Image (spheres, rainbow, N blue to C red):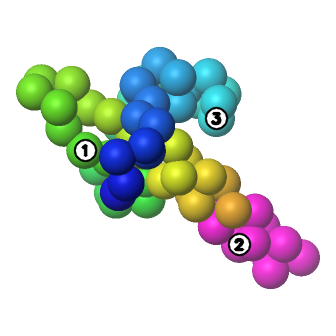
């Protein structure tokens, strides 16, 4: 991770993915979505969200 990496909060990721808090934390817990802890807060690098979306898109396209 570079010094300029943008870190997103769980509510921001919830908005991007249009998922609830529990669903986002499940993605983090199952390591489908990379995250880091900053104190007692959880942060998701923006590139991890982009990677997750691309991976899901590729999986969906392959299923067709």
Q: Which mark is residue 13?
A: none
Judge from the rendering whether residue 36 lies leftward or rightward of residue 59; answer left or right.
left
Q: What element carries label 1?
A: strand
Instruction: Name the spot of residue 42 as percent of width and height, x first.
Output: 26, 32
Boundaries of the magenta span: 55-64
Judge from the rendering whether residue 18 lies leftward or rightward of residue 47; answer left or right.
right
Q: What element carries label 2?
A: helix
The quarter holding residue 63 reads bottom right
Judge from the rendering whether residue 42 lies leftward or rightward of residue 26; answer left or right.
left
Residue 16 to residue 49: above or below? above
In the rendered image, the residue lying farthest to the right is: 64
Residue under circle 1?
Answer: 36
Instruction: Name the spot of residue 30 as percent of width and height, x first.
Output: 33, 57
User: Are circles 1 and 2 on residues that touch, CB within 8 Å?
Assistant: no
Residue under circle 2?
Answer: 59
Instruction: Name the spot of residue 1 as percent of width and height, x first.
Output: 35, 57
- Magenta highlight on residue 28: no
Residue displayed at 33% across by 34% down = 43
| Residue 28 in sight here | no
What is the magenta segment's predominant secondary structure?
helix
In the rendered image, the residue lying farthest to the front is: 3
In the rendered image, the residue lying farthest to the left is: 39
In the rendered image, the residue lying farthest to the bottom is: 62
User: Are circles 3 and 2 on residues that touch, CB within 8 Å?
Assistant: no
Instruction: Name the spot of residue 38 as percent of width and height, x first.
Output: 17, 32
Residue under circle 3?
Answer: 17
Residue displayed at 52% across by 43% down = 46
Nearer the observer, disc 3 or disc 1?
1
């Amino acid at each position: 991770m570079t010094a300029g990496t943008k870190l997103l909060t769980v509510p921001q990721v919830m908005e991007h993915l249009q998922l609830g808090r529990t669903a986002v934390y499940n993605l983090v817990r199952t390591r489908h979505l990379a995250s880091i802890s900053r104190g007692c807060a959880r942060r998701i690098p923006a590139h991890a969200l982009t990677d997750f979306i691309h991976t899901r898109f590729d999986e969906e396209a392959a299923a067709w």
